[in-house]
Amino acid sequence: MSSDGGAKLRKAFETGLDVHVQKMIVAISPSGPFLQRFASFVDSVSFNNYREATFHVPDGNTIGEISVWNAPAMRTFVAGSNTQLETLNIVQ
């Protein structure tokens, strides 16, 4: 993600009811701390292609729905305590 990419994404979340990101390349895993940073803006997250071996939902996360499609490398899904996750879909 570019140096101002986080700010642009936050602004999109603030102004749009439904935000669709076609492709995002980040230096760290798109789960974990990255996911936590945007949890206050979204209720659900869907990944069409997930290339990491581990998906991590941090402690205290407030996202209610996570869908992960096309994740052939994923071997582990870790959800921290106090997560509000109600729906989880993982499709290899």
Image: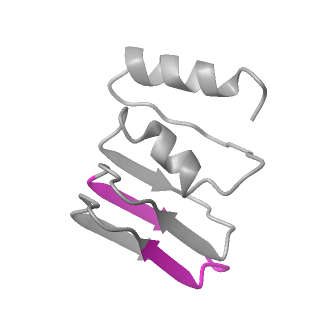
Q: Is residue 74 magenta?
A: yes
Residues rendered magenta in the picture = 64-78
Q: Which quadrant: the C terminus? A: bottom right
Q: Position of residue 62 (x, y in %)?
A: 29, 49
Identify the residue shown where x is 23% and y is 58%. Answer: 84
Identify the residue shown where x is 51% and y is 23%. Answer: 10
Identify the residue shown where x is 67% and y is 57%. Answer: 29
Structure colour scheme: one colour
Q: Which quadrant: the N terminus? A: top right
Q: Position of residue 68 (x, y in %)?
A: 48, 65
Locate residue 21 relative to residue 66 in the image: left or right: right
Q: Where, by quadrant of the figure, is residue 51 drawn? A: bottom right
Q: Is residue 69 visible?
A: no
**Depth check: 56 or 75 in front?**
56
Q: Is residue 22 visible?
A: yes
Toward the bottom, the furthest residue is: 75
Q: Is residue 88 magenta?
A: no
Above or below — where is 6 with respect to 21? above
